[in-house]
Image: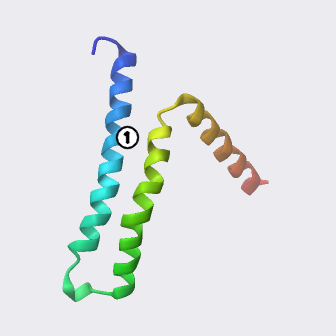
Amino acid sequence: MPSTTGRQKAFSTCASHLTSVTLFYGTASITYLQPKSRYSPDTKKLMSLAYTLLTPLLNPLIYSLRNKEMKRVVVKLWQRKVALHTA
């Protein structure tokens, strides 16, 4: 890509994809590759819940953070939250 803007856009897309894939396969691998010695039904249920609910819920958020307006709103909300906690 010849321009800096193009490289930033490509990196943003790549980072979004990597985050989604890591979230998806990370929870799946923890769920299914956990050793039997550490087996806990409650932990297994929690990880299965994260695998089935968290990934689909967070994907739109991950991809919407590529939008500049969305980033601005998130930063504004974060700053407001920090200001409330420090006051």
Q: Residue furthest right?
A: 87
Q: Eyeballing the image, is 8 above or below 23? A: above
Mark 1 neighbour class, 10 Å CA radius: few under 14, some 14 to 19, many 20 or more: some
Q: Quadrant of residue 45?
A: bottom left
Q: Quadrant of residue 37?
A: bottom left
Q: Eyeballing the image, is 17 above or below 31? A: above
Measured as percent of width and height from the top left, residue 6 is found at 35, 18
Residue labelled with disc 1: 16
Q: Tell me which residue sits at (26%, 85%) in the image.
A: 38
Q: Residue furthest top?
A: 2
Q: Tell me which residue sits at (34%, 80%) in the image.
A: 44
Image-based side of 61 in relation to 85, left or right? left
Q: Eyeballing the image, is 59 above or below 73? A: below
Nearer-the-camera pick, 85 or 72: 72
Image-based side of 76 in relation to 66, left or right? right
Quadrant of image for the N terminus: top left
Q: Secondary structure at mark 1?
A: helix
Nearer-the-camera pick, 2 or 67: 67
Image-based side of 38 in relation to 68, left or right? left
Nearer-the-camera pick, 68 or 76: 68
Measured as percent of width and height from the top left, residue 35 is found at 20, 81
Measured as percent of width and height from the top left, residue 26 is found at 29, 61
Q: Tell me which residue sits at (32%, 87%) in the image.
A: 40
Amino acid of disc 1: Ser
Measured as percent of width and height from the top left, residue 63 is found at 44, 40
Q: Eyeballing the image, is 2 above or below 46? A: above
Q: Tell me which residue sits at (40%, 57%) in the image.
A: 55
